[in-house]
Image (tube, rainbow, N blue to C red):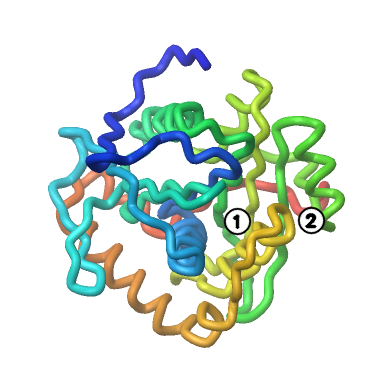
Amino acid sequence: MESPFEPYALVLNKGADPRTGGVAVCGFSNAGMVGVIAASHIIKALALNQQGTVLNADFPAVALIQDAVPKHPVRVYQGEGVGVFTAEIQFDHDMDVSLATTVLEWFDKGGFDRLIIIDGLLRPDKEFEGGNLYGVGSTDAMREALAAAGIDPIRQGVVSGITGFLLGEGDRLGMDIIALLAEAHPMYPDARAAAIAVEAVSDLTGLDLPLGELLENARTIEDSVREMIERAAEVLPPRAKSDRQLQGGADVDPSVM
């Protein structure tokens, strides 16, 4: 795989084997924090092991403390036939291409056969319960997989940021990439939207991803993620804090879905 863009450094843990194979999943701190909540749940549900960390001098100097363990905010995990890439803090827009290129490098070195991106689709009028899920596939095979799973496609619109770049590269390079966009509340982390996306991942891959704990603890998870993002934002540059909070991952006209 060739890319004209430079990725960030993916530093593997000692003894880690990058070739996981199978399905790759990634989630970021975009609209409603859907991606990062879903990625965290998948990591926990499948008991995945941390494989490495993405590092760069331009990243904010911050450690996220989870269950008394400090961690860098951008990490990769692996299990048998599955890998997860997660970024648990919001970055400025000008870092999107490099982060996406890092995902592609991880995908290539891991020997994965398809990539599923989990993101949010902001709906200003969304209620606290429910919400729809939409999908975009980079290849005919992925569009057919979405149809077989009963996931409505986005037929017209714009997908921005890391997710949009990855989809475009999937089309350019002929890579099997799916983006799952769950309608998310614009003002708070939306664990219920993340659960809808995780259920779709299970349908698409056959992975056993129970949702009971995620749904039962939705409010606690949402509060925890909100606090983590707000604390991390304190060390971000001023321009990164101005417009990143719970921003949209896609801009879509619902009349053409």
How packed is label 2: few (under 14 Cα within 10 Å), some, or many (20 or more)? some
Where on the picture, by quarter, is residue 254? bottom right
Q: Does 191 sit left or right of 58 as displayed? A: right
Using the rendered view, name the quadrant where residue 92 is placed: top left
Asked whether, in this view, residue 73 is left or right of residue 117, the answer is left
Q: Earlier in the sequence, mark 1 or mark 2?
A: 1
Kind of element beneath mark 2:
loop
Please state if 206 lies on the left or on the right of 19 as rendered.
right
Up-down relation of residue 107 to residue 155 (above or below): above
User: In the image, what residue occupies the spot 72% across and 38% down?
Assistant: 137
Mark nearest the camera among 1 and 2 is 2
For label 1, the SS is: strand
Picture disc at residue 105: none
Q: Residue at x 33, y 75 (%)?
A: 224
**Looking at the picture, how far across and down is residue 70, in whole percent?**
17, 61
Residue 211: percent from the left, percent from the top?
Answer: 59, 76
Q: Nearer the viewer, residue 50 or 159?
A: 50
Residue 170 to residue 76: above or below = above
Q: Is residue 177 left or right of residue 43?
A: right
- The location of residue 160, given as percent across then percent down, is 54, 39
Q: Amino acid at mark 1?
A: Leu
Q: Residue at x 68, y 70 (%)?
A: 131
Using the image, tell me which numbered label, if any, was put on residue 151. Answer: 2
The amino acid pointed to by label 2 is Ile
Q: Residues within 10 Å of mark 1 (few under 14, many from 20)?
A: many
Q: Residue at x 76, y 39 (%)?
A: 142
Cα gap from disc 1 to disc 2, whole angstroms: 14 Å
| Circle 1 residue | 121
